[in-house]
Image: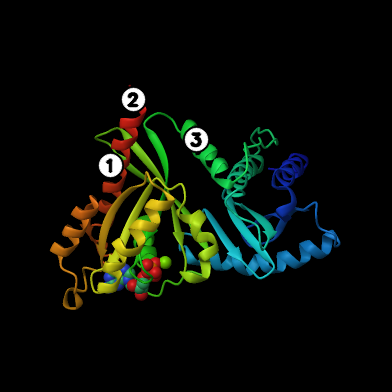
Amino acid sequence: MPVDTKKLMALLQWYKQSLGEDLVAVLVVNRDGLIMDSLVGASEKSLDEEIIGGVSALVEPVLTRITEEFSSGSFGTGTFDTEEYRFIFCESGPEAVLVTVLNSLSGVDAVFPYAYLAAEKIARIMDGRTVSPVIPKLISGPGGNQIQRKVDKVQKVKIKSKEYAFKLILGGDGAVGKTSMVHRYVENDFAKDYKSTIGTSIMKKECSFEELDSTVRFIIWDLAGQAQFKRVRQSYLANAEAGILVYDVTNRVSFESIDKNWYIEIKKSSPNIALILVGNKIDLTEDRIVSCEEGESLAENLQLTYIETSAKTGENINDAFKMLALHIIKRYIETQDV
Ligand code: GDP
Ligand code: MG
């Protein structure tokens, strides 16, 4: 089916207008990184071809890397930083990826909502469906939080009744198994040498409860690395509705770090977050140092539910997410009705 290139260009123009000065370039590429359409930001002084040529050389290898990290080839959204640029990759239907290139100092938080909207519209254009190329203004004041809140609202309104979508984050020291848990939950797989190269990867996963006639849609944000991504940490932790605090049962420092660091930091950024506590790597019975009782007692102090998991064997992984979803449904229903 021929793509309505006029409409695609109109959409990119709207997108460019929405992002303003921060935008270096926007590209629509196929899964191999080949450019289907592109536009250069308003503040760029160099030749358009130079800019596009320069960034597209970076797009292909990064896209390949992101796609390889997710064995299914589907990654949702990913960000990637170079010295000069910040990239946001947004899947746009099965064929296209929207690549937004920002100045290295721009915040991605305010851009995400627009990127999601634009990517969704591009998918529809590719599909030959009718869609308006207009991107509505989501900004109502200074600061990214307001925008995020609005988008959260938009998302919730869009979701049909008894269906909810929530931002889920994971807190815990490096190497406790956060990424492995997400990977196990989303892909039902355990990759032994999983090393993330992406700043933040964002995945969607639905958790259904037939008994309750409900579906919780998690938008799972997994932050890669620790200190080197301090810049994105604040936006990563903010406005989350669900969180999993993870420690490694073979590592006492990671256990102590939960109430010393992670609980406090997360509560500060997202005061109303629904949290659970997870002791991971229970398959390593010989190396276990933190007992089940200690985990339970910490959970009791923090007034959280406690569950023990193994991302390696898959034990209790689904249940951990399910438990969190239940907490959220309960809370959501409590605040919604009457
Ligand atoms: P993150 O830094 O918290 O995201 O931790 P990762 O998911 O990258 O995992 C760190 C290391 O622990 C990796 O080598 C994983 O293979 C390993 N790992 C994660 N979960 C488990 C588990 O449940 N059991 C065992 N034995 N190893 C695990
Ligand atoms: Mg990780």
Q: Quadrant of residue 326?
A: top left
| Count of numbered tags | 3
Query: Mark 2 and mark 1: span between their CA atoms?
Result: 17 Å
Q: Nearer the viewer, residue 70 or 256?
A: 256
Mark number, residue 326: 1
Sequence-wise, the earlier of marks 2 and 1 is 1
Give the left or right position of residue 326, taking residue 98 as reference: left
Residue 70 horizontal/vertical position (percent): 47, 62
Q: Residue at x 38, y 46 (%)?
A: 271
Q: Is residue 195 above or below residue 178?
A: below
- What residue would you read off at disc 2? 337
- What residue would you read off at disc 3? 153
Query: Mark 1 and mark 3: span between their CA atoms?
Result: 20 Å
Sequence-wise, the earlier of marks 1 and 3 is 3
Q: Residue at x 68, y 33 (%)?
A: 132
What is the three-letter code of the residue carrying label 2?
A: Asp
Give the left or right position of residue 301, taking residue 127 as reference: left
Residue 274 horizontal/vertical position (percent): 33, 46
Q: Quadrant of the C terminus?
A: top left
Q: Residue at x 34, y 61 (%)?
A: 181
